[in-house]
Image (tube, rainbow, N blue to C red):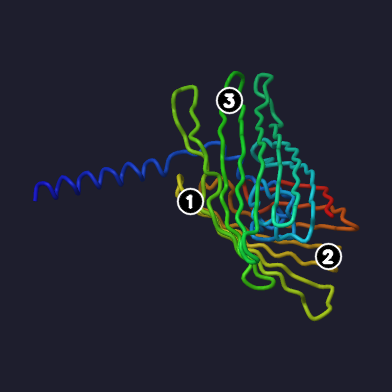
Amino acid sequence: MKNVGKIILIVAFALISLSLRAQQQEVLSFTRIERNPRAAGLAGAGAASVSSTAYASFVNSAIIPFSNSTADFAAGYQYWAPSLGAAHAINLAGAYRIGNIGLSLGGVYQMEQKDFDGFRPAEIQVGAGFGIRVLPWLGLGVNARYVQENLFQGYSQNGFGLDAMAFFAPLWGLTLTAGVANIGSRVKSNAGGSYPQPTSIAAAAAYFLILGAGSKHSIEFMLDENFYIHSRTNAVSFGMEYSYDRIAFARVGYRIASEGTVYPSHLSLGLGAQFKGFRLDVSYLTLSEIIGNSVAVGLGYRF
């Protein structure tokens, strides 16, 4: 009985230790900000949608081989979280499909609007992705990224992260994806602390519906979920995109997130236009004290 008691005690301490570690502060949280202006207008939903692949290196490169486009390139600007002092971000991204293989690249540079004693905090992220269609209905993808955050003069922290995703297309119009996002190295501070990156278990679904045979009207519904392992927080994004003849787009989304989640609850609105492969996307975030009034604008070209 004494041995059983010791075992129970050891297991209890182990569970407490894991719990404490799971709830510790995450760093490099800017890696989870939605950079795609289209997806930003959907409150971050769209990881399972093949309608836009330019930003696949940020989220899910498994979708690229299922796209109808050979290449998709984009550039964007974000005015982020003005209530926190505001930050300006510029991003470049692109994806290219070669048969059943997909390749992607992406990067973002973000700088705070306010300076501190002449120094402005800034963040950098660069990444690449690879996707493959292994079966007509199954794709696999992986992303790798390097991130660096310069918080103040003489102090920075950096790390590497990976995404591993599986993509499923079981029925026409229905697409699903699941995997792990941002599996990252622990980040060490100058003070000797060690912190995790915001790793999450991710799952998403999208359904594309044409409103009547031969109709120029269509709607795509999207649902994304992320459970953040270390902070034990959860977030669900709902998004809907209406399209007229794949020329004009209207988007709306809502994100429900646990308190402390790196990308908080909010409502998003978006508009888009596309002509001969060129496109313009705009999104606006509201109903959030943290990221309300954030704006994203993007230009893109696909063929």
Picture coordinates of residue 283, whole percent (x, y) = 75, 52
Q: Earlier in the sequence, mark 1 or mark 3?
A: 3
Q: Earlier in the sequence, mark 1 or mark 2?
A: 1
Q: Nearer the viewer, residue 65 or 260?
A: 65
Above or below residue 212? Residue 77 is above
Q: Nearer the viewer, residue 114 or 227?
A: 227
Mark 1: which amino acid? Thr
Above or below residue 41? Residue 16 is above
Mark 3: which amino acid? Ser
Q: Earlier in the sequence, mark 3 or mark 2?
A: 3
Name the residue beneath numbered marker 2. 246
Residue count near mark 3 (Cα–Cα under 10 Å), binned few <14, some 14–19, many ≥20: some
Name the residue beneath numbered marker 3. 156
Element under disc 1: strand
Report whether 284 appears left or right of 206.
right
* Label 3 vs label 2, nearer the camera: 2
In three-dimensional space, the C-alpha distance between marks 1 and 3, rounded to whole angstroms, equals: 26 Å
Name the residue beneath numbered marker 1. 233
Picture coordinates of residue 57, whole percent (x, y) = 67, 46
Which residue is drawn at the image coordinates 64% and 52% (left, top)? 60
In three-dimensional space, the C-alpha distance between marks 3 and 2, rounded to whole angstroms, equals: 44 Å
* Label 1 vs label 2, nearer the camera: 2
Please indicate, yes or no, whether residue 274 appears anywhere in the rendered image: yes
